[in-house]
Image: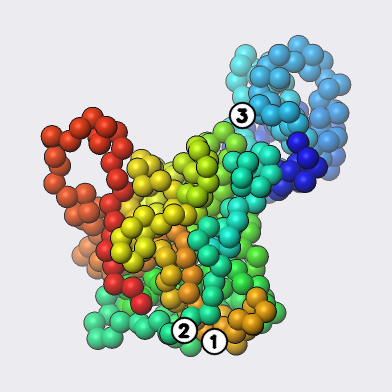
Amino acid sequence: MTSQSVVEQEADYRPDEVVVALPHEGSVLAVLHEARGGDLHVDRDELLGLARISFDAQATVQGLSSLDDWERASEAREARLPRREDPSELDQALSGLRAVLAHRWSGWTPTMGKNRLVASVEGGGRISGGMVGRISGGMVGRISGGGTAPVAATRRARLPQGTRPGQGVRVGVLDTGLSPHSRLAGCYARYSDLLSPEEDAEPRAGHATFIAGLVLSQAPGATVEVRRALESDATGDSWSAARKIVQFGRDGVDVLNLSFLCFTEDDEPPMALAAAIDRLDPAIVVVAAAGNHGAMEDIAQARPAWPAALDDVVAVGAVDAAGRHASFSPPENLPWIDVRAQGVDLVSTYLDEVELGGSQQFRGFAQWSGTSFAAALVSGAIAAATDPGRVPARAAWDDMRSALAGPTHPERTADAARAPLQPVMRLVVP
């Protein structure tokens, strides 16, 4: 493994942090104190039910090796290490902590994991990170690509005129900050997280602005509330995102759009994101992008993307304007993807009066592709079908899903039953 690939592999999580279930925090801290794992910093979140512990992974590995339990737990420790040639210091620290605690408590181990990094599913052109580096050989890490990069639009997106479906509906968008676009005036919550002027030079900083325009193209009467979980380069971590998800839930949004994701080495969901979704009111419909890794070779293109692959999340893939499967969208028969919508060459609101990529001058609108944007359209469609006080968002989505599924056909072959194609939601796009 090259030094470059090691750096990229370690870039998919915070190398000096673990996330621990609150009831197990004391047990983990006790061993860390014994191991003299450097200065320990604990950030507890009662709503999330988790604690984030910052420590020195290298010092912890050295300290654990001096404990009496270390040698006796060596076999269990080795079994808990990731199956790769060069496990990181955090991997070694986690496996050591689990092995020592399992030895002390008759096999019991605490619920804990890494603080994963997340990134927007934008059309940036590549996926970085992974077990062996770039996307051609890697399978784990941050995603920031697929489809195409944003280009200046030759036309302006139009919001629907006349009727205003979505009146009274609140749509949460957890993403980058929002650019206060004139076309969005009066349609977003005044306490939304806005971009600062100096951030406009980064193409991915316009991700949330593009998404907000697409949501409102379907539900012009809705109010979009944007909160920031990603920096202007469209990256963040799962701990921060999870806390914002729970806060959205407490504030009572109807639909929550999550157009960001991460992969994990064992294909298990990141602990913080799973806990956050689990704590939301079931009435809230969470919509997430399925990822832009469909052009990857072999099994990598089918990797579950989180949080989209969680059970209580509407995972959205992409098709083009003709309804054909988008090449960057994960395979159309994956069981964890619920629906597909147009995600190719969409036009929406974007950064204004900025020059990106040399000669490209953006004047408030852009053309972009990706499952991020297909998810935004689905979020808007659910909001449009929601009628506060009469038809909650969950009922609206259930009705839409039933209509998309159509009648059942007992005569389907066994192969077809194992691999149903994800339905396509046909929407009028701007």
Q: Amino acid at mark 3?
A: Pro
Quadrant hosting residue 214: bottom left
Label 2: element kind: loop
- Whole-percent x, y for residue 43 in the image: 68, 49
- Whole-percent x, y for residue 267 in the image: 53, 36
Q: Which mark is residue 110?
A: 3
- Whole-percent x, y for residue 409 in the image: 14, 40
Taking the spot 61% from the left edge, 63% from the top edge, the residue there is: 234
**Crowding near the residue tagged with mark 1, few <14, some 14–19, many ≥20 C-alpha atoms within 10 Å:** some
Q: 107 or 49: nearer the eye? A: 107
Image quarter where the N terminus lies is top right
Instruction: Please state if 190 lies on the left or on the right of 70 as rendered.
Output: left
Label 1: element kind: strand
Marks 2/1: CA distance? 10 Å
Q: 359 or 15: nearer the eye? A: 359
Taking the spot 50% from the left edge, 61% from the top edge, the residue there is: 147
Q: Please say if 80 is above or below 325.
A: above
Taking the spot 32% from the left edge, 78% from the top edge, the residue there is: 221
Mark closest to the chain's N terminus, 2 or 1:
2
Q: Which mark is residue 363?
A: 1
Instruction: Please state if 389 lies on the left or on the right of 224 as rendered.
Output: left
Q: Amino acid at mark 2?
A: Thr
Residue 54 in sight: no
Q: Which residue is mark 2?
A: 154
Q: Amino acid at mark 1?
A: Arg
Marks 1/3: CA distance? 52 Å
